[in-house]
Structure formats: C-alpha cells, structure tokens
Amino acid sequence: MLYSMQMDRTKGLVTGTEENMTIQQLDSTIQRNKVNLLVYIKNAREAATGKVEDIQVELNDYEQLIRGLPKSQREILNIQRRVQVNEKMYLFLLEKRASAVIARAGIIPQIKVIESARTLGVVRPDKMKIFYTFMLGGALISFIVVFIRVMFYDRIENADQLKEFTTLPIFGEIITSEKAADNYVVVDSDPKAAITESFRTVRTNLEYVPGPADRGKVVMVTSYRPNEGKTFTSVNLSAILAKAGKKVLLLEMDLHKPKVGVGLGMNSQTGLSNVLIGKLPWREAVLHTQFENFDVMLAGPTPPNASELVLSKHLQEIFSEAALVYDYVLVDTPPVGLITDALLMMRHVDATLFVVNTRFASKDHVNNALEVLNANPNKNTGFILNGVRIKKSKYYYNTNYGYGYRYAYGYGTGYGYGYGYGKKSKKKDDVAKDVDD
C-alpha cells in the first residue's frame, strides 16, 4: 500500500509540482503510514524479544533438570560399587579365617626333644686373652700416632720441642700477637701483653750473658732465612732494653733489605753505608728514636757492594767505639742462609741471637741452622723462638693473669707478669708478616 501511494506521488509530479494539493495530501498520507509502520515494527520486535526470553527461561529450567539426573545416578552407582567391594572383602576374609582354622587344626610338630638342657655353671671371660688383645691394639695405635706425628707434624711450636734438637741455650720465646699489626714496637704500645713479657724474659737472660766489664755488649740478631722476625725482634728488644734504663744503639746492618727504619717510622739520607766507606763519622749517622736511651743507625743509601762493606775496617771501629758509649749495641743482619754477612760479623760480637720462627721451624730447618753455626763457632750463641702461640708455650698461660718464667740455661732466670691474655689470637697473614721481619 505504501508502495502504491509512492508510485501515485511520482506520477502526479510528472504533470504537476509539489505545491499541488493532491501531492501534498499524498505526502501527508505517506508520512502517517511510515510512522504507523515503524510503531508496528517496534511493537512486533518487542513482542518477539519477550517470547524469546520466555522460551530461554523454560529452556534453562529443562537443562537444570537434565543436569540433575546424571549426578543422582552417579551417586547411586558409587554407593552400589562400594557396597559390592565391601561385600567381596568380607567374604574373602571369612574364607581366609576358615582356611587358617583348618590349617591350625592339621599342624603336627616336626621336632623331638632328645635331651633336656642342663647348666654347667658360670662361664667366665678369658682375662689374659682380652688383656693381650688390648695391649696389642694400644701398641699398634700408639705406633700409628707416633708415625703420623713424625711424618706430618714436625713443626717446632715451643722451646721444649726446640731443646730436643739442640744443646745451644734458648734465650726465650716470643709470643705471637695480633697487636703487632697496629704498632711495630709492640713493647711500647702494649706493655702488659704476653709478647712484651716474652721480650722482658729475653732481656733478663741477655743480662746474664758474660761480656767485657769495661764496655757494653755487642749482640747480633740474625736468622737462617727471611721472614723469621729478626728485625722485629731487634727493634722490640732494643726498646725493652731502653725502657730498663740501658743505653742502646741499634745498627741496621742488613744493607740488602733494610727494614728497621720502616718499623720505627724513620728515614735518613745517610747511614751505615756512608760510614763504612769512610765518608762519614759514625757518630754523625746516629739518630735518636722516640724512645729514651734508644738510638739507631739506619742503613742509609743501598750500596752496590753491600757484602764487601762488611769487611770494612770501619765496622770494627763502630763496634768497639759504640760499645764504650752504649750498654748494648744490637746488630740487625741479613739471614745467614742467603747472605754470609752475619757470619763475617760473628767474630766481632759478644753474643749471637739466632731467631727461628715457628712457621718454618722444623727438624730440617733447625739442623740447617746448626750446620751453619757449627761451621762458624762463636761464643754465647743461642736461639730465640719467634711466633709461639700462647697455648703452646709452657711459660705463658692462657688465663686472665699470665706469668712468664724460664731458666736461662746457665745465664740466670727471667720472670715477668702481665694481665688480660685469655683471648685467642686470630690467625691473620698481615699480622704474621709484620711480626716476621
């Protein structure tokens, strides 16, 4: 119908215009029909949507009913299955029970008692067999321990062990200390430490070394190999002697690798090398340290012929003249295992202190040192054992109140005391390096 009216309007426009009354009426009729048609379509769409929703609700209800039916059926089947399993288990157990009753009723004993048991009294252990067994086992274990000790643990850790390898006197044990890393002159920084007490023991033993009455003593400090602590021992022994009121002069005769100046924090452009070549009087090379009564003569410029300078006539002049001024003239020398300077100086000194460090002290090490000393015999030669742990020392106890006491092997006795040494010293490479030279 709307199409027919649209065609009529088109035909009317052929013979007329849009202002024609007939055309305007057609337009008004077409517009009303369009509005009515749209309203009808909208109402029809809403009605269709409502029917779809109603159908969907019914469909959901039916689906819910359908989903519920299998679940109930599965539960019923599971219950039936468990009932069957329990029933079969019950029947199986009944059968086994009946079989066990039948089997028990048919058992016939297969053994027969031939003779009744009788007692023979108390059976005692074989004491002699046990005794010899344990004696043999103890001897075997002791042999194994001794073998392991001899083969793998040959380090010398205290003076008693060092005495087993030498008849030379032992002037003392230098206790290891971690505080030496902070202050090279540990006898000044910590006067109550165990290491300070050990230097006091060496000082006391050194007092009993025989020497000329009209002059001071010339004491040489050396070692077999480097890093055994001879320079550390020289500096601290000089300081502890000076604290006892003795006038001390320390000569840095290790012209190859001098370390005394580093340990004391001192430096000088002139020293022993200038004196030995005759360019400087020895008194002008003497320097005063920060300690009263403690003077030092540093090595000076490193010469190209250090070993030849030891043969200089000026060296003996230094020893003889300095001994008239000082109570002690200590000489720090190179290690005798590498350089022979110390062996050449032995004939000019009153005593030789041979420093041995526990890090290297073994039977072979001590024997090598003894071979050198025996080949160059000298009076008043003895050992100082450096780097001894306080727990290993016989003379310094690991308590809050420690003592140091020892006999000086013909020279007298030494006695000292200190406080606060119950702590375990930590093992540190840089501490050992500072103490070792």
Image (cartoon, rainbow, N blue to C red):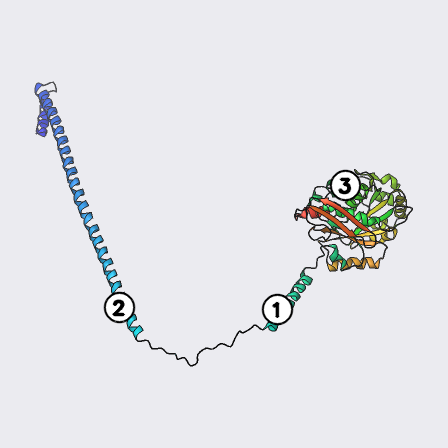
The residue that label 3 is drawn on is 264
Check whether the beta carbons of the residues at disc 1 and disc 2 lie within 8 A of each other.
no
Label 2 to label 3: alpha-carbon separation: 102 Å
- The x, y position of residue 24, in whole percent, is 10, 20
Answer whether residue 341 is visible to the viewer in this image.
Answer: no
Label 1 to label 3: alpha-carbon separation: 61 Å
Q: Quadrant of residue 418?
A: top right
Of residue 409 and residue 144, the one placed in the foreground of this image is 409
Residue 95: give its label: 2
Q: Which badge, 2 or 3, is on the more N-terminal residue? A: 2
Horizontal placement of 20 versus 368: left or right?
left
Q: Amino acid at mark 3?
A: Leu
Check whether the beta carbons of the residues at disc 1 and disc 3 lie within 8 A of each other.
no
- Residue pictured at 58% horizontal, 73% vertical: 126
The residue that label 1 is drawn on is 134
- The quadrant of the picture occupied by the N terminus is top left
Disc 1 versus disc 3: nearer the observer: 1
Of residue 145 and residue 23, the one placed in the foreground of this image is 145
Q: SS at mark 2?
A: helix
Q: Is residue 378 above or below residue 257?
A: below
- The x, y position of residue 251, in whole percent, is 83, 45
Number of labels in the image equals 3
Q: Which badge, 1 or 3, is on the more N-terminal residue? A: 1
